[in-house]
Image (cartoon, helix red, strand yellow):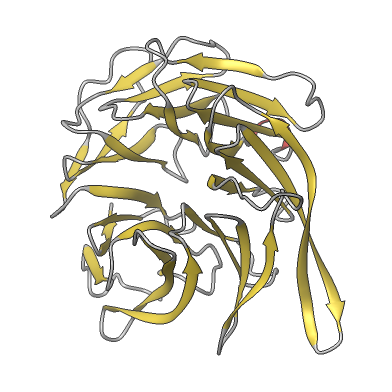
Amino acid sequence: MSLHGKRKEIYKYEAPWTVYAMNWSVRPDKRFRLALGSFVEEYNNKVQLVGLDEESSEFICRKTFDHPYPTTKLMWIPDTKGVYPDLLATSGDYLRVWRVGETETRLECLLNNNKNSDFCAPLTSFDWNEVDPYLLGTSSIDTTCTIWGLETGQVLGRVNLVSGHVKTQLIAHDKEVYDIAFSRAGGGRDMFASVGADGSVRMFDLRHLEHSTIIYEDPQHHPLLRLCWNKQDPNYLATMAMDGMEVVILDVRVPCTPVARLNNHRACVNGIAWAPHSSCHICTAADDHQALIWDIQQMPRAIEDPILAYTAEGEINNVQWASTQPDWIAICYNNCLEILRV
């Protein structure tokens, strides 16, 4: 799908509810397809799959399905070649994996790690391993991270039935865990990091789970909400504190000392996205309606100002940089999704 003939820079979609979770499809045959999750403070929530129609240059809602509670995160299977089933994962009360078909979207498996309890500990986030798409990691308010393995089996009448099992569960933090992300270091399969309410960034290796490394601790012990690895240089990651107006860039080779602070936002930061194709570009989005793109090449010298700024019509809840279409960034605010050409 080539939109270059039209050279439109911004496309907008209005959902029937507040949009919180949002992400780009990765498959090469599904360009400009995104999943959106509703944020409604009740049990009944929705997920919509939307796509940009090439002819009309408008977003079209292709599918809507029910989801219990708001999704804290959505991710499509990191399948850049289009060889796996078309799967979408969502986190909320549990981790769910959905298969997107031509006619229907079907729940393939619900991954529940506390079978012996009537209560579930909600999942704050998850990540899908890019090197091994049969591996996912979840973070929970119960202080743990769980690494899940998926299987696809052949069953009569249902091809590629997907199921999952717990590979390992570990107590990752002293308090709630708010985010988890696999690192591309060391082969890209076994290293991951997490952040949480104890204000620390911790790094783990699936091959040596008996110990972890504290990469950073917030000086005021403020909870850290998000963590994001640089897509090209696995030494760098970004994090942000709850209600914080700055994003901290860390270098795992220099623990506990930020190499940069990005602090032009005038209200709390909600989202971070590294460029998929460049090690020195990162986008931050905040309640000040701004999405800012930064060039951090001159680290460790101070990064004074962003190189690009976009002002939305509302507080930006989320930002995602399209991994297979690096010219495009998606943001959501209020009930709107916008994709911006950069």
Residue 34 visible somewhere in the drawing: no
Left or right, 291 with respect to 61, comes to left
- Give the residue at x 21% y 62%: 9
Residue 226 visible: yes
Residue 335 lies, in percent from the top left, at 24, 64
Q: Is residue 166 above or below residue 19?
A: above
Point out residue 308 in the picture as x, y percentages from the top left corner: 21, 40
- Determine whether, in the image, residue 107 is placed left or right of residue 211: left
Q: Residue furthest front?
A: 118
**Residue drawn where x is 37% and y is 36% of the image:** 281
> Residue 282's image quarter?
top left
| The quadrant where residue 180 appears | top right
Of residue 216 and residue 11, the one placed in the foreground of this image is 216
Q: Nearer the viewer, residue 76 or 28?
A: 76
**In the figure, is residue 159 to the left or right of 330?**
right
Q: Is residue 248 above or below residue 161?
A: above
